[in-house]
């Protein structure tokens, strides 16, 4: 509290302070309304296939029936997931992809010291850290379960996301 016009020895009058704003947090009325909002957000982020014919009669990548709309064709991603190769083939492809990535990083590492640019040591450190992570991933890939191999395969080859 602040003392108005007094010395530190005498506290006779207390100055009024500004009122503090009150922050109220409201909870959703029901859990179902929260789930509805989450489902709506998921629907907005779904990937929708486009019709490549260009005639403007796109169905959004899905086959629809007359009034019911119950029958839908699978997306290309779902078809690719349904036709996954065996576990050994997936492991071999993942190993090749990781080794290729390590090879490219090592090639980039060889060119960095000769550049002499500021931040070269930082870049080298980051690249060596990435190589260590990739090698660790390669080692754990050999002893991981089919489910882990399948998820990593889908992420890298079907969704075309980076390894790390």
Image (spheres, grey):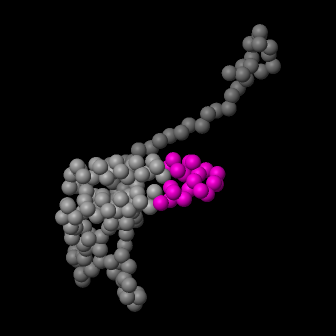
User: Is 132 covered by the magenta stretch?
Assistant: no
Q: Residue at x 23, y 49 (%)?
A: 143
Q: Which residues are magenta?
A: 107-126
Q: Residue at x 74, y 13 (%)?
A: 11
Please tell me in which quadrant of the rendered image residue 75 appears: bottom left
**Residue 92 position (above or below residue 18):** below
Please tell me in which quadrant of the rendered image residue 147 appears: bottom left
Check the image and name the residue furthest to the left: 86
Q: Residue at x 20, y 61 (%)?
A: 88
As rendered, which of 45 and 53 lies closer to the eye? 53
Image quadrant for the C terminus?
A: bottom left
121 left or right of 90 in image: right
As rendered, which of 13 and 139 lies closer to the eye? 139
As rendered, which of 53 and 72 lies closer to the eye? 53
Q: Is residue 99 visible?
A: yes
Please tell me in which quadrant of the rendered image residue 63 appears: bottom left
User: Is 123 covered by the magenta stretch?
Assistant: yes
54 left or right of 88 in image: right
Check the image and name the residue furthest to the top: 9
Q: Residue at x 64, y 54 (%)?
A: 117
Q: How many marks?
A: 0
Q: Position of residue 113 (x, y in %)?
A: 57, 53
Q: Position of residue 30 (x, y in %)?
A: 34, 48
Image quadrant for the N terminus?
A: top right
Q: Position of residue 120 (x, y in %)?
A: 59, 51
């Amino acid at each position: 509290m602040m003392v108005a016009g007094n010395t530190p020895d005498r506290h006779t009058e207390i100055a009024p302070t500004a009122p503090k704003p009150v922050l109220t947090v409201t909870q959703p009325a029901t859990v179902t309304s929260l789930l509805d909002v989450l489902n709506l957000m998921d629907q907005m982020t779904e990937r929708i296939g486009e019709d490549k014919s260009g005639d403007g009669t796109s169905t959004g990548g899905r086959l629809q029936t007359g009034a019911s709309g119950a029958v839908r064709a699978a997306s290309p991603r779902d078809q690719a997931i349904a036709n996954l190769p065996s576990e050994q083939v997936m492991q071999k492809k993942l190993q090749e992809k990781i080794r290729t990535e390590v090879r490219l990083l090592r090639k980039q590492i060889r060119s960095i010291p000769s550049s002499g640019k500021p931040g070269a040591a930082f870049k080298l450190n980051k690249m060596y850290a990435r190589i260590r992570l990739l090698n660790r991933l390669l080692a754990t890939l050999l002893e991981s379960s089919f489910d882990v191999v399948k998820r990593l395969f889908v992420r890298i080859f079907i969704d075309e996301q980076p390894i790390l």
